[in-house]
Image (cartoon, rainbow, N blue to C red):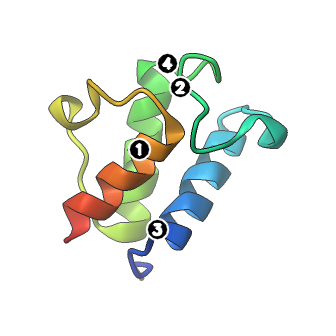
Amino acid sequence: MEIEVTPENVEREIFEGLVELGTEREALSHEATLESLDVDSLDLVELAQIVEDEFGVELRGDDVKDVRTVGEVIELVVAKAE
């Protein structure tokens, strides 16, 4: 069952996904860069899978190639769902 796409729901799922991938919860914020969180391309693929499973939103490589912060990931998912 897909979760309603709201900024709050997307934030919660992205944060949970990043924690599952080994990111410290205290390090998470909208301003945190993926680089500073040691999120690599493989982690992004896993995060994209979580997004697709939870929200039915498909993120492709072109979609995420310019994304630099956690907040940008959240905004991208919300925008693609509209």
The alpha-carbon separation of the residues under discs 2 and 1 comes to 9 Å
Disc 3 and disc 1: Cα gap in Å? Answer: 11 Å
Q: Tell me, yes or no, whether the two marked residues, 2 and 1, touch with CB atoms within 8 Å.
A: yes
Which type of secondary structure does the marked residue at label 2 adopt? loop
Separation of residues labelled 2 and 4 (CA atoms): 8 Å
Task: Check disc 1 and report its element: helix, strand or loop.
Answer: helix
Identify the residue position indicated by label 3 in the image: 7
| Type of amino acid at the residue the image marks with label 1 | Val
Q: Which circle's residue, 3 or 4, is located before the other in the chain?
A: 3
Q: Does 22 sit above or below residue 8? A: above
Q: Position of residue 50 (x, y in %)?
A: 46, 53
Amino acid carrying label 2: it is: Leu
In the rendered image, which residue does mark 2 sit on? 34
Q: Which residue is mark 4?
A: 40
In percent of the image, x 61 and y 63: which residue is there?
Answer: 12
Q: Earlier in the sequence, mark 3 or mark 1?
A: 3
Residue plotted at (71% across, 43% down): 19
Q: Which residue is mark 1?
A: 73
Mark before the other along the chain sequence, 2 or 3: 3
| Depicted 17 relative to depicted 80: above or below | above
Q: CA distance from mark 1 to mark 4?
A: 14 Å
Three-letter amino acid code of the residue under disc 3: Pro
